[in-house]
Image (cartoon, grey):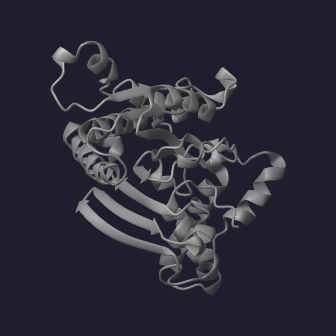
């Protein structure tokens, strides 16, 4: 299987089509696109059989990608619009897997002390938790309120415990009907950094996008449905160089009008060749934008507000 080094299903599909020189939809993969407004677009990718699963290395299920432009300068109104879009898509997935009263556990993965990896724990601080109030102060809760609990379990390097082991213990004790997991992802595109949200109903493999794969968190390991919400916050140097090379070639093509060699070079995915050149010198770093602090804060607001609205 191709080494995608991205967690996004839509990117994996595009890379597979480019590498295999395949036009049109891949067998076992269906997709649709919707434009919410000039700044927000939604793409829905559904993997329907083993052929699609093998092609892009993602389990059978639904993957929704929400692209949000101009997030660096987003105002409160734009953030709320993005949160509404996320809420609508999340609510549809929830309705497929749990009833209106089913208890939900929200999990924020990542290391709060490392900014690009801090999204999950930051979102947890903003979640409207209700489980304790319903259990101990039911007279203050509106009838029909859903039980919601939340946790940021930390990372293996600081706890010494695999996240899935912590979550198994929680699930076995409080018996939620569904888990929502939030995590930072890796992308194969510079422009997707902290401007894309992916939702999926297949769970998550933490660290897979940066080659640090941890134990899977899914219905297979927890016994209940797992919805994953992920946002790309990092890319590899090879991705940065590959995207920059495409932009440079595009500029030369515009100036030269025609060049067969440059056309051929741009049509190919040069990521693997670039990566091979960088690895011997340990130059294939994981990089993140200088504005990552502001971007994480905006994405934290979008995800937390979207989850709270949908629950």
Q: Identify the residue shown where x is 38% and y is 27%.
A: 149
Front residue of 35/260: it is: 35
Image side of residue 86 versus residue 265, left or right:
left
Image side of residue 95 versus residue 14, left or right:
left
The quarter in which the N terminus is drawn is bottom right
On the image, the x and y values in percent for residue 216 come to: 62, 45
Q: Does residue 56 appear anywhere in the picture?
A: yes
Q: Identify the residue shown where x is 52% and y is 33%.
A: 109
Image side of residue 232 versus residue 98, left or right:
right
The quarter in which the C terminus is drawn is top left
Q: Identify the residue shown where x is 19% and y is 32%.
A: 144
Number of disc labels: 0
On the image, the x and y values in percent for residue 267 come to: 59, 78
On the image, the x and y values in percent for residue 89 come to: 30, 53
On the image, the x and y values in percent for residue 206 come to: 60, 42
Direction right: furthest residue? 280
Q: Identify the residue shown where x is 29% and y is 54%.
A: 92
Front residue of 13/58: it is: 58
Front residue of 248/239: it is: 239
Image side of residue 60 versus residue 68, left or right:
right
């Amino acid at each position: 299987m191709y080494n995608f080094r991205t967690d996004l299903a839509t990117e994996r599909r595009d890379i597979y089509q480019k590498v295999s020189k395949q036009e049109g939809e891949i067998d076992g993969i269906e997709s649709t696109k919707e434009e919410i407004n000039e700044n927000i677009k939604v793409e829905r990718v559904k993997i329907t059989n083993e052929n699609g699963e093998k092609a892009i290395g993602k389990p059978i299920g639904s993957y929704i990608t929400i692209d949000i432009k101009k997030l660096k300068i987003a105002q409160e109104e734009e953030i709320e619009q993005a949160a509404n879009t996320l809420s609508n898509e999340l609510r549809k997935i929830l309705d497929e897997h749990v009833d209106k009263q089913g208890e939900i556990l929200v999990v924020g993965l990542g290391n709060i002390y490392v900014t690009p990896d801090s999204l999950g724990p930051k979102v947890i601080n903003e979640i409207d938790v209700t489980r304790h109030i319903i259990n101990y102060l039911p007279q203050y809760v509106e009838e029909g309120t859903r039980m919601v609990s939340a946790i940021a379990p930390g990372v293996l390097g600081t706890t010494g415990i695999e996240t899935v082991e912590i979550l198994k213990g929680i699930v076995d004790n409080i018996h939620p009907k569904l888990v929502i997991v939030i995590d930072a992802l890796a992308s194969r595109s510079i422009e997707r950094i902290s401007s894309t949200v992916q939702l999926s109903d297949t769970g998550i493999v933490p660290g897979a996008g940066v080659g640090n794969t941890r134990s899977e968190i899914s219905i297979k390991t927890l016994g209940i449905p797992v919805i994953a919400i992920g946002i790309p916050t990092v890319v590899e140097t090879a991705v940065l160089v590959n995207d920059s090379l495409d932009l440079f070639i595009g500029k030369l093509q515009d100036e030269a009008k025609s060049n067969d060699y440059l056309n051929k070079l741009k049509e190919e995915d040069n990521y693997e060749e670039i990566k091979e050149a960088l690895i011997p010198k340990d130059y294939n770093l994981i990089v993140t934008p200088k504005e990552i602090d502001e971007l994480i804060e905006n994405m934290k607001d979008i995800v937390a507000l979207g989850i709270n609205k949908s629950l």
